Amino acid sequence: MTGRRAGNADHDNEHVHGASTTTPAGHASRASIATSRLASLAQHILPLGSKVSGKHEFDYVIVGGGTAGSVLANRLTEDYNVSVAVIEGGPSDVGLDRVLNLSRWLELLGSELDYDYTTTAQPRGNSDIRHSRAKVLGGCSSHNTLISFRPLKEDLDWWAQCHGCPSWSADKLQPYGDRLKLNTVPVQAQHRNQVVRDWVNAAAETFDAPLISDFNAQIVHRDGFTPSKGKGAGFFSISYDPYNGDRSSASTSYLHPIMPQAPRGARKNLHLFLETWAEKVVFDGANSKRIRSVQVVQKGGQRFEISARRDVILCAGAIDTPRLLLLSGIGSAADLASVGIECKHDLPGVGRNLSDHPETIIMWETRETPKETVMLSDAGVFLRVLPPSEEPGNGELHKDQPDMMMHCYQVVFGEHLKSKGYKLPEHAFCMTPNIPRSQARGTIKLASANPADKPLIDFKYFEDERRYDERILVEGLKAARKIAQHAPFRQHLVREVAPGPAVQTDEELSAYARSVHHTVYHPSSSCKMGTPGQIRREGTVSALQGKVDDEVVCDEKNLKVVGLQGLRICDASVMPVLPTINPMLTILMVAERAADLIKWDV
Ligand SMILES: Cc1cc2nc3c(=O)[nH]c(=O)nc-3n(C[C@H](O)[C@H](O)[C@H](O)COP(=O)(O)OP(=O)(O)OC[C@H]3O[C@@H](n4cnc5c(N)ncnc54)[C@H](O)[C@@H]3O)c2cc1C
């Protein structure tokens, strides 16, 4: 099995396509469709508070029914006097087994439910990475692996102390983790196989790292990785139903209970525009700094505007939120001019500061593939591989925190090995060292003024000034080899397939690591929040430190786009830097807190 497979024909979701794209204008024709399911779906097309005269107007318009968007849609509609529209590019996930069954996640990559972005050429990295981004209700939480970590205290305090975000310190954001609706539990006993059990023990014993039985309990209640100085190994916590393997995604947790099929029926103040693409945000004719509506186009080609009495909230993710802003004339005036778009609001930070967690891979041939698993990558290890003095920028805060993390895969996870000429075995075990605090910062720019053209995504992998990123991967590969020597785990391994025993020096390991590297699929920070006018305390380019940070896109107090009214952002793009851990729960928590800020209209 490689990382990608073409998706099946989507016969399992046809029942939601038509109804889900219904608009108020199309109400009568849709209601006549002769199925009770569609009739019930049609009920919530006339939300309280909206005008029905063919004009689509709501209190809030959320662009993107993904991870963060689902939380906001739920929380804002808790007040039945408030109407909310969600504009989602993909279909509903209701009834889609290959989405709802977590073990089938690999089938979704590269399918029609994936925007499947590519990158620009990466001179120091791998130019062949395809960045999956889900095109379905629930967004990436509907096709990811649902590994679920609460953020480290040190990461949130880093936002507060070093990145101009005092409102998002650990004491302010961490309590929102207790409010999350997902069912997050450590991988259950029936899903733990002997190979991964042996690997977890080998990792812990090799590095004298504690065995962690519940990562989130450790992070929230036991001082995280501080007592072990950045080390820990264990089975992950995953958001799933251990009984049947179903996803517990943002959609199943926050939207399904308030959609028409829910036992208690739909919230009538929630309107889902599915398979509807937001092309741009539209300025108010009478106020050049106020956003009035969103121009959308539906699958059938119907184009119209959806207006917000209060706010448009962009939740389209770290790639599509900056793309949408740029297409709307909000961004760097020079960059917009270069593609022939009139600049309506000069905001240079849009699409800058793009970050990711790059990972590399080391693979061994094994004799067989174990059967028990949640989703093929059930455990991980955190380590400290460089001395604290090497920690870039914020050494004090992160001196006792991990600087390298590895997932394991109990299958042949070899997309980039194959394309680089490695012959892949039938059975394999892989370790994938990644860079929790990568120093590379990239950009998202438009290729043209045509909204249909995919953007130019340049992560600038391994271009950081200090070459910190590649050193973490080199040390990660060495750590993986040490784990592989530990009994009884080593008895599962036949031979090292990639990079292979001939690759030994740091230079060789770095060249290999970078040539086959992949992504943990965590693009973020491309419309970062901060304090307008803040001075940069740290950054990857030393010459910019001490200068006013012109990359702030939204105000950390309220997530409003700097200099505009009626426009907020809430998704992975606002995090000023990625947290050390896999970010989904952090993004959900940001959305939970954003809902409060919006309700209180800060
Ligand atoms: C394969 C994969 C595995 C991952 N595994 C994990 C993991 O195990 N643990 C973890 O913590 N993180 C994981 N991640 C990362 C995590 O899922 C994402 O960081 C997170 O879900 C992003 O949330 P978001 O709200 O920013 O965006 P999304 O969840 O991507 O939501 C954006 C939504 O906006 C919609 N949209 C975009 N543009 C438009 C437009 N113009 N008009 C209308 N709709 C639009 C999209 O269809 C989508 O539904 C993984 C990601 C991937 C891709």
Image (cartoon, helix red, strand yellow):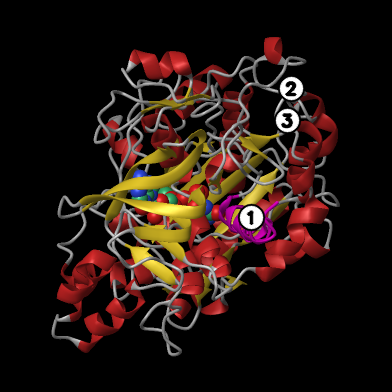
Which percent across, then down, holds residue 287?
Answer: 50, 35
Residue annotated with mark 1:
594
Question: Residue 357, can we see it?
Answer: yes
Position of 379 with respect to 370 (left or right) is right
* Residue 515 in which image quadrant: top left
Which label lies toward us, 1 or 3? Answer: 1
Q: Which amino acid does label 3 sit on?
A: Leu
**Magenta: main secondary structure:** helix
Neighbor class of circle 2 (other Cα within 10 Å; few <14, some 14-19, many 20+) is some
Q: Which of marks 2 and 3 is nearer the N terminus?
A: 3
Which label lies toward us, 2 or 3? Answer: 2
Q: Look at the numbered discs 2 and 3 and tell me whether their residues touch, using CB distance below 8 Å.
A: no
> Which residue is pictured at 17% across the width and 86% down the height?
35
Residue 584 falls inside the magenta stretch: yes
Instruction: Tell me the element at label 2.
Output: loop
Q: Earlier in the sequence, mark 2 or mark 1?
A: 2
